Image (tube, grey):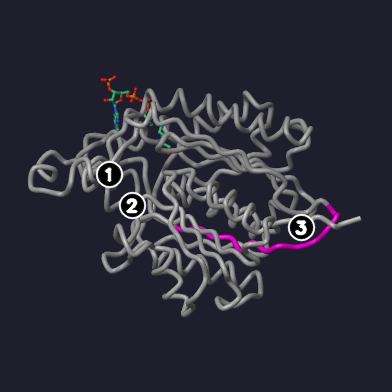
């Protein structure tokens, strides 16, 4: 009997910039308070990229750490996918710039625009390309410098986001141990797209003095509406992953949801029946790093001994698009 080809995570890596911006720092920028931010979001501080850092720099540091753990070299990679809403520039892609910074050429490389779900979408695409035989060793990255697209005069958004990058190295492996990415479930709905958007700089509103005057190059968000949809979509797709694999919440060893808001995470975990002891969170220190949030959390969980061989890990993402999705992994 044929042994199935699985996509297995060989290494993880993360990088967050050194500069810390606390809630108290934000009190001096906008009309807000540490108490409000902590109570409404669970965030205490976030990291900000240095002026000379670009998204591909953050991605490169995370990627090198993932490759080191995997004991592989950049030359081993034949596929690079970067999930990002804040590429270095519209083109060339951050994935190609990253490949160059890694000192490698020739691999397939592309960016993936799925908002905060970008990493999970990338994981889904890489899994399928590996299983189909069109890639052998894939680098999947979520990397963001959101501080460059945040309106620092808008207290409704500027308190929530942070910069960072996370990466995984995936490889095809024939095994019948059940180890690997078990399933990915990806969804989108453009009907809710206006709840979280950056409208300037594309074909609808090309960059002009008028778009700058109207602040269209900044993130605009209807947080309260988004909150409700996020809880519903994250819950539905987490349940979808469990029912698809014929497991229950009791089987999940660690739940790693998108790190947007502690109240969203508690609501989703509660609705799915997963106790908070089995939920990984780090948004207190990094805020919402969009596509980077899940791979940073995964790397911290792994390096912090929260993940053991054989564990069942559930990833759950939600973001602009709207997009959402889940992945179930046997470690
Ligand atoms: O990555 C995925 C996409 N993003 C998300 O998933 C974010 C989802 N949404 C959220 O996390 C929450 O909606 C927020 C944290 C953004 C806001 O919390 P909320 O409980 O939904 O607050 P709200 O928007 O309903 O605002 C309540 C009040 C308002 O004042 P009034 O109208 O009641 O007088 C806001 O103006 O809080 C005010 N407010 C603030 N006050 C102090 C909004 N932002 C701030 C602030 N500091 N930073």
What's the CA distance linking mark 2 and mark 1? Answer: 7 Å
Q: Report which residue position mark 2 lands on.
A: 21
Please tell me how many numbered marks the rendered image carries.
3
Write the residue at 38% across / 23% down: 225
Q: Residues within 10 Å of mark 3 (few under 14, many from 20)?
A: some
Mark 2 surroundings within 10 Å by alpha-carbon count, few (fewer than 14), some (14 through 19), many (20 or more): some
Labels 1 and 3: the sequence-earlier one: 3
Residue 102 placed where, x, y %?
A: 47, 76
Which one is earlier in the sequence, the residue at label 2 or at label 1?
Answer: 2
Residue 45, given in percent of the width and then of the height, sits at 39, 48
Residue 108 horizontal/vertical position (percent)? 51, 66
| Pointers 2 and 1 in contact (C-beta within 8 Å) | yes
**Label 1 sits on residue:** 26
Which quadrant does ligand 1 occupy?
A: top left
Q: Say which element carries label 2.
A: strand
Task: Residue 176: say if magenta.
Answer: yes
Q: Secondary structure at mark 3?
A: strand
Query: Circle 1 — which element?
Result: helix
Residue occupying the point 76% across, 63% down: 173
Image spot of residue 144 (x, y percent): 39, 54
Kindly indicate the quadrant of the structure image that contains residue 250. Answer: top right
| Residue at image mark 3 | 5
Label whose residue precedes the other's in the sequence (2 or 3): 3
Question: Does residue 276 appear left or right of residue 53 in this picture?
Answer: right
């Amino acid at each position: 009997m044929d042994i199935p080809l699985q996509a297995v995570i060989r290494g993880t890596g993360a990088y967050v910039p050194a500069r810390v911006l606390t809630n108290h720092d934000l009190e001096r920028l906008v009309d807000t308070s540490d108490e409000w931010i902590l109570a409404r979001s669970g965030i205490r501080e976030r990291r900000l990229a240095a002026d000379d850092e670009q998204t591909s720099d953050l991605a490169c540091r995370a990627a090198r750490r993932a490759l080191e753990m995997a004991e592989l070299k950049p030359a081993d990679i034949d596929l690079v996918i970067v999930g990002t809403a804040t590429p270095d520039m519209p083109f060339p892609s951050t994935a190609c710039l990253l490949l160059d910074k890694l000192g490698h050429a020739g691999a397939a490389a592309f960016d993936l625009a799925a908002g905060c779900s970008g990493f999970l979408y990338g994981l889904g695409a890489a899994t399928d390309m590996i299983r189909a035989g069109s890639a052998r060793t894939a680098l999947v990255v979520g990397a963001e410098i959101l501080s460059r697209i945040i309106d620092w005069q808008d207290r409704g958004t500027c308190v929530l986001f942070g910069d960072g990058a996370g990466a995984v190295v995936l490889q095809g492996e024939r095994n019948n141990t059940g180890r690997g990415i078990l399933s990915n479930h990806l969804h989108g709905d453009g009907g809710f797209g206006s709840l979280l958007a950056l409208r300037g700089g594309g074909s609808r509103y090309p960059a002009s003095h008028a778009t700058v005057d109207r602040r269209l190059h900044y993130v605009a968000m209807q947080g309260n509406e988004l909150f409700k949809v996020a809880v519903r979509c994250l819950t539905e797709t987490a349940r979808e992953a469990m029912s698809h694999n014929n497991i229950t919440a009791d089987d999940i060893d660690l739940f790693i949801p998108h790190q947007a808001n502690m109240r969203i995470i508690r609501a989703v975990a509660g609705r799915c029946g997963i106790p908070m002891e089995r939920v990984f969170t780090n948004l207190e220190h990094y805020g919402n790093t969009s596509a980077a949030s899940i791979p940073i959390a995964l790397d911290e969980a792994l390096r912090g001994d929260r993940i053991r061989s054989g564990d069942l890990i559930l990833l759950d993402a939600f973001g602009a698009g709207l997009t959402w999705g889940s992945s179930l992994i046997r470690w």
